[in-house]
Amino acid sequence: MLRHAIAPTRFFTQISNDIIRHPRLSSDAKCLLTWQLSLPPGADEPLSVSAERAGIKKTAFIRAKRELKAEGYVHEWRRSGPRGRWSTTQLVSNVPLTEAEALAVRDGGSTSAPPTAAPPAVGEPTPRAVGRSQENNGEDTPHPPHPLAERGAAALAAVSHRERRLRLSGRDIRALAPIAGQWFERGATLTELHEALTAGLPDAVRSPAGITRDRLLRKMPDPLPEPAPAPPPLRACAGGCGRMIRPAADETRCRDCRLQAAEAAETRAATADPHDVTGAVEATRRGVAAIRKAMSGAPAGGPRDRPGHAPSPLRA
């Protein structure tokens, strides 16, 4: 199976895999939820209008809405206004919320949902904001949250919702989100994180935030190995042979061209004046010997390396 995906740079919505792969949500329910989460801030669109725009029929819409309410992604309240008119308030969230958490969001209180939990999408006729990830206003942290921290916050919120012994407040989730994000940075999956936090929990947990922090730090996976450095680029051999070489250090010629240059230098050294007192011949011989040793990998120390034994010219 081959997959090709290009990350969009604009006009996109982050949808968790928990929604995409939810085993109890039908395709119509997922379509309705993602449609609502994709609406821009301030859009005034109730669920029924989103269903109509998405091509979801009335019966399918009722079933999809019931599924979303059962799983905690949609909450709905009917209230009577001052003149006896009834209004419906709808809350759409990108993470499951309990009834108490949903009421806290509706009334502007705190909730254990992560910072990315969607603000309420309110039904007609009262004004509303739609279900989208909440923008960071810079009041809680000096910098915008890292994507991995956001993913960690969503994971902690999911664990907190499913495991009642690990109920975390919104402040706890924000504090622990960067640590959970490191798990994903090191290649861990959501399932692995969930198992590490919930496996073998005691029957009574006095400090959910404390035991969560301890397990996040103590069971953190090892860092991923550093990627291998890219090989140096190919370049043409400077010896004129026309070959392409990939230098290991600062070589400019291929092995054969370097070997030929070493043989030529050795020939010149062998035919040089034996009474030369400048040391040029001996320096040439030492350089040639070093080159041959590097090329062949054989240790130096043969007869031609000892004083008084001049090397003879090489033959083909």
Image (tube, rainbow, N blue to C red):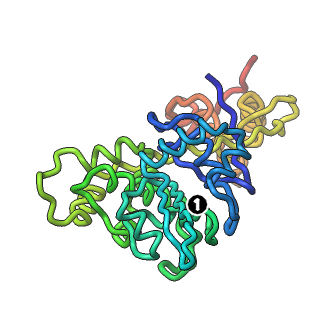
Among all residues in the image, which is located at the extreme bottom? 139
Query: How many labels sit on residues?
Result: 1
Location of residue 253 in the rendering, given as x and y in whole percent from the top left corner: 77, 37
Indicate the secondary structure of the residue bearing disc 1. Answer: loop
Question: What crowding class fits label 1: few (fewer than 14 Cα within 10 Å), some (14-19), or many (20 or more)?
Answer: many
Q: Position of residue 311 (x, y in %)?
A: 65, 30
Which quarter of the figure is the C terminus placed in? top right
x and y, in percent, of residue 155 in the image: 41, 53
Q: Residue reaching furthest left?
A: 203
Q: Is residue 198 above or below residue 265?
A: below
Q: Nearer the viewer, residue 235 or 14?
A: 14
Give the labeled residue for mark 1: 131
Amino acid on which disc 1 is placed: Gly
Q: Residue at x 69, y 53 (%)?
A: 12
In the rendering, at what x and y percent does residue 306 appear?
53, 37
Q: Foreground residue, 218 or 250?
A: 218
Is residue 200 in view from this perspective? yes
**Residue 270 is at least partly visible in this image:** no
For the residue pair 196 and 15, the one nearer the viewer reads as 15
**Quarter placement of the N terminus:** top right
> Which residue is at 47% across, 42% downward?
67
**Residue depicted at x 58% and y 65%:** 122
Is 251 displayed left or right of 101 in the figure? right
Please say if 293 is above or below 137.
above
Relative height, residue 68 to residue 103 (above, below): above
Give the farthest residue toward the top. Answer: 316
In terms of depth relative to the viewer, which is nearer, 230 or 115?
Answer: 115
